[in-house]
Image (tube, coloured by chain):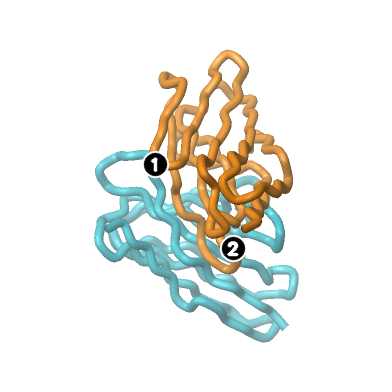
Chain colours: A orange, B cyan
Amino acid sequence: QQQVKQSPQSLIVQKGGIPIINCAYENTAFDYFPWYQQFPGKGPALLIAIRPDVSEKKEGRFTISFNKSAKQFSLHIMDSQPGDSATYFCAASRWSRLTFGEGTQLTVNP
Amino acid sequence: GAVVSQHPSWVICKSGTSVKIECRSLDFQATTMFWYRQFPKQSLMLMATSNEGSKATYEQGVEKDKFLINHASLTLSTLTVTSAHPEDSSFYICSARWRGGSDTQYFGPGTRLTVL
């Protein structure tokens, strides 16, 4: 599978902060880039997704920034809350086959 | 909407036995279902893609004779781990793609398999 590199591995922010998680991909054939949130012992839940013809997408407190030329995309979480503490995965898709990043464990302190 | 269930949520079995995991799309028809494996503190790895009524497509390195996948209807796919060994212990997660053609995949809650 093609690689998707995600950073940082872990992230700690204070309540109200704006954590930023970054991903980089190699294969320019990827055409769909979702972000998932996963709590321990649960399946991933889709947060937000973007296609490469769009540079930014916002849904609620979640924003994806996409840089096609750099083959990078990032997730910003506005006004983060302790309940946002979870593992976040970026992914890239080609023909609906998802390749996941390594994951970022986010902790939001009260 | 877009709910995917898995059964069982956890299972413990003896080495050498077979275990079947069910994945159901509860409120939509899924042309395609996917099976992933996730080891502790690691990412999800795609094992196979399953299209209704046809043979599953396995990712490189995944043994098709060990991980049997059946997708008999638009709402049900099953994964059978045959002759399970302790190294097969993992979190198995399915996802389903809506028949309408969207790229969005909806994930099930996962099944924790422990092989003794």
The C terminus of chain B - image quarter:
bottom right
Q: Chain of mark 1?
A: A
Which residue in the structure is indicated by mark 2? B65
The quarter holding residue B77 reads bottom left
Q: Residue at x 53, y 65 (%)?
A: A42
Residue B57: x %, y % from top left:
50, 48
The N terminus of chain B - image quarter:
bottom left
Q: Secondary structure at mark 2?
A: loop
Rendered position, A74 above or below A83:
above
Which residue in the structure is indicated by mark 1? A60
Q: Chain of mark 2?
A: B
Marks 1 and 2 on same chain: no
Q: Secondary structure at mark 1?
A: loop
Rendered position, B85 above or below B104:
below
Q: Residue at x 33, y 62 (%)?
A: B3
Q: Amino acid at mark 1?
A: Gly
In front: label 1 or label 2: 1
Residue closest to the far top: A69
Give the CA separation, mark 1 to mark 2. Answer: 45 Å
Q: Nearer the viewer, residue A17 or A105?
A: A17
Q: Are marks 1 and 2 in contact (CB under 8 Å)?
A: no
The quarter holding residue B113 reads bottom right
Residue B36: numbered disc: none
Rendered position, A15 above or below A40:
above
Graded by Cα atoms within 10 Å as few (under 14), some (14 to 19) or many (20 or more), the crowding at tag 2 reads: few
Q: Is residue B45 visible?
A: no
Graded by Cα atoms within 10 Å as few (under 14), some (14 to 19) or many (20 or more), the crowding at tag 1 reads: few
Residue B55: x %, y % from top left:
43, 53
Q: Is residue A20 visible?
A: yes
Residue B80: x %, y % from top left:
52, 70
Q: Amino acid at mark 2?
A: Asp
Rendered position, B36 above or below A2:
below
